[in-house]
Amino acid sequence: MASMSTTEVEELVYKLEQLAAEDLPPSILNDNVLRRKLREATQSLNTAVQWPSDSVHLIAYGALYSSMARVGVDTKTFEVLGGSTKPMSSEEVAEKTGVDPVLMKRFLRFYQSFRWIKETSENQFTANNVTKALSPPGGTGIKYYNTVLNPAFTALPEYFKSHGYKNPTNPLDSPWQLGYNTSEHPFVWLQSHPEHFQLFMSWLPMEREGLPQWLDMFPFEEHVARETKDETVIFVDIGSALGSQSIALREKYPQLKGRVIIQDQQHVIDAWTPNARPGIDAMVYNFFTPQPVKGARAYYMRNIMHDHQDGQCHEILHNIMAAMSHDSVLLIDDIVLREVGAPWRSTMADMNLLSALAAKERSQKEWYALLESAGLKILSIWEYAAETGDSIIVAKPKEFV
């Protein structure tokens, strides 16, 4: 492609400014593919035109972004702006949040410079889509990462240097232990720290808010739940946390006959019980032990396998396989990394797992190798969120294929 002329670039800048200044039309916002292409193209352009010092500053200040976002969440600054129907001055926001007016003006000046809020005129601010994303309930994610994971992230340079830049594989010797100065496994540590555990449990079902969900793509009724009866176990949600996916299944198929069972450890089931939903049974279960529910139509695991090394995955898989029948399928809901051009949300998830659990996201080749070695055959892979690589991997024991 020939280089664009200065005039053509100026015309492009004008069009982009016009597009950004207005509310984007539904033709863009409702088209996930077009929306993603526009986002990635503008991000690539932004990177291409940065001065070297821009790049250094934008990357080096990463910890500041997280902390300043947390300040905005804690003071309800984003919530106040997001709930206003008209622009507000820094003094008005300060009054509603209880923040010193001079300090609030500095906060708002920072937030507008990174487009987290919109500055409409001198000392007049309003919400944009980022402001609303950081308002409840989205602010929970800011609290979670800033509180729970930042110590492990901060420990990464020292950890890699002290371990000779070897790929971590031991969940008891990861950046988490260094960051928290503990010898405990993260999941054990969380149980004895209620505030951190609550943030973890609250953020899990919200982590992919706004993205396509697996039930939007995967034809569950056709592939799993044909000709079911009331007593048929149609869905065993292993390591379910607070049952968000089982709830979604019941809501999408309210007339579907059959039992839905969530399984998790005692403290998680205890947290579920006060808000239990009808049509969903709860069971205390550790997936490193034999699966007690036999012959279910679907055994489902969301973001479980990526927490564990291959050897532990084999244990989990063998326990499930022993309970499966000819009519059963295994549904693994996890990221499948692309070999080329992996999206940033999936690579961030990979580093998240490395930091906390010495674990990893897997590529398609790695998924095939893992399941084949466990005695399973992958029947299909349904990618349902291109932004993350989230996919449903459908598998059966080889003996049943």
Image (cartoon, rainbow, N blue to C red):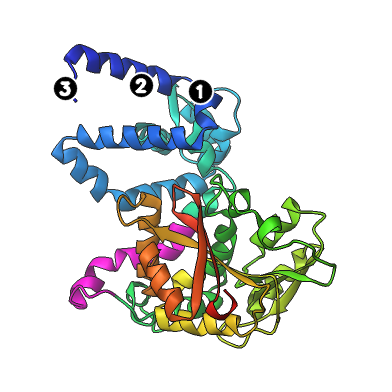
For residue 23, which numbered disc appears in the image? 1
Residue 293, given in percent of the width and then of the height, sits at 71, 81
> Could you give the CA–CA distance between mark 1 and mark 2, rounded to whole angstroms?
12 Å
Q: Which residue is mark 2?
A: 16
Taking the magenta stretch, the answer to whether it contains residue 314 is no
Q: Main secondary structure of the magenta part?
A: helix
Q: Nearer the viewer, residue 120 or 277?
A: 277
Residue 175 appears in the picture as rendered = yes
Q: Which mark is nearer the camera, 3 or 2? A: 3
Q: Which residue is mark 3?
A: 2
Q: Nearer the viewer, residue 123 or 338?
A: 338
- Residue type for callout 3: Ala
> Could you give the CA–CA distance between mark 3 and mark 1, rounded to whole angstroms?
32 Å
Residue 277, given in percent of the width and then of the height, sits at 78, 62
Q: Nearer the viewer, residue 311 or 87?
A: 311
**Numbered range of the magenta stretch:** 143-167
- Residue type for callout 1: Asp
Residue found at x 22% / y 44%: 57
> Could you give the CA–CA distance between mark 3 and mark 2, rounded to whole angstroms?
21 Å
Residue 126, given in percent of the width and then of the height, sits at 50, 27
Quarter of the rendering occupied by the N terminus? top left
Q: CB atoms at circles 1 and 2 under 8 Å apart?
A: no
User: Height in image: 330 above or below 38?
Assistant: below
Q: CB atoms at circles 3 and 2 under 8 Å apart?
A: no
- Residue type for callout 2: Leu
SS for callout 3? loop
Quadrant assignment, res 21: top left
Count of numbered circles on the image = 3
Residue found at x 58% / y 81%: 321
For residue 286, which numbered disc appears in the image? none
Left or right for 259, reference 35: right
Taking the magenta stretch, the answer to whether it contains residue 153 is yes
